[in-house]
Amino acid sequence: MTEYYLESGYTSLNKKNEELCGDKVESIYQDGKMTFVLADGMGSGVKANILATLTSKILCTMVSNEIDMTDCIETILGSLPVCKERGVAYSTFTVVHVDTFGKGCLIEFDNPQAILMRDGKCLDLPRTESKILGKTVYNTELNLRENDVIVMFSDGVIHAGIGMNLNFGWDREEVKEHLECIISPTMSARCVACELATACNQLYHNLPGDDTTVAALKLRKNMRADLMVGLPVNKESDSVCVANFLSHDGKKIVCGGTSSQIVARYLGTEVSASLDFPDPRVPPIGFINGIDLVTEGVLTLRRLLELSEAYLSPKDLTPKYFTAKDGASELAQILLEDATIIDFYIGQGVNEAHNGLPIDITMKLKLVESIAHNLKKLGKHVTLHYV
């Protein structure tokens, strides 16, 4: 049985004129299993946000600890504040609890039915109905395959376009057709969620009539990337550092002119530079035989940090895949979208080429550590090696 990587992501749209979203997503990775919860609080604004936040946090904690669903729902009903206007405490939810082999369960209460994407097609998951404390809850046993994606969403998705582009909103079959048209097997879970949320925002004419959240979980193979930036403290360590950097399979990336020279010398080759300048903010890339990507250092990393901040935001609707050919965009595609295991080899030596420039080793270290921090937030397995 093959063990896989569990990748998750979501995008949320606030209802127009609301500062807080009434939907909430929580996730916990514990003991080789991921628990992923999408909750939709009744109404909108502050009240809905409180209901959704409590529901998602309680469910995520309890389900991840394998507590029976009856006890989970009883705890939620006893914990949610009662709305003075409606006299009820109410939040819908969808929960996925799955291990790295794709085995697990899906639990749904009053949210639109989740969709399974497999081999480019959208499928309905078989559901078993049960009654828990008078509530109708649907259970699905999961047996996911490589590259399967579970797409979950709040009812803001199927309400999209009501009274605007569409008379009765976007029904589930139309959502499935749209997903089959726009989603490719290489897209990350975060990319899938963003693409569908963007389509909803367009149907709402950028003025969502309801809180709208799309969350996705994908089962995929691990992919490794190693990145070398900066030169070692001791010049005698150059060969050892490069040998360690090249010792694993996976994508190989070198950032910085001096680092590139060190790697090229070790490989017995030379660095060549591109004459293309696709983004004036980012210096051109270079080429070394045997290395997947060669970029400039500080300016490229600074731009990569900006891209990672936008990628992390659940409210950002810019595409989560990167097709531009500048060094920062190519780096972003590998590190943010493709790789799951990332090792940084960070040289702490002083670079004489930076004498007289507003660049020091502290600046570079902070940039790399900030990027690594953002990658960890995405659930990547990140290791920093200081040399």
Image (cartoon, rainbow, N blue to C red):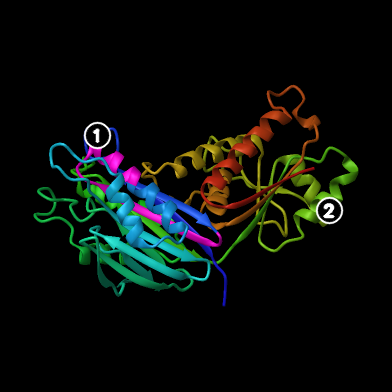
Residue in the image at 77% along x and 36% along y: 348
Q: Is residue 369 above or below residue 130?
A: above
Specify start and end residues of the magenta stretch as a single range: 31-54
Disc 2/disc 1 C-alpha distance (Å):
57 Å
On-image quarter of the C terminus: top right
Quarter residue 73 falls in? bottom left
Is residue 306 in sight in this rendering?
yes
The residue singled out by tag 1 in the image is 18
Q: Is residue 76 above or below residue 224?
A: above
On-image quarter of the N terminus: bottom right
Residue in the image at 77% along x and 60% along y: 247
Is residue 190 in sight in this rendering?
no
The x and y percentages for residue 299 are: 61, 34
Q: Residue extending furthest bottom?
A: 1
The x and y percentages for residue 101 are: 52, 71
The residue singled out by tag 2 in the image is 266
Mark 2, secondary structure of its residue = helix
The x and y percentages for residue 303 are: 55, 37
Q: Is residue 121 above or below residue 270?
A: below
Amino acid type at image mark 1: Glu
Asked if marks 2 and 1 touch (Cβ < 8 Å), the reply is no
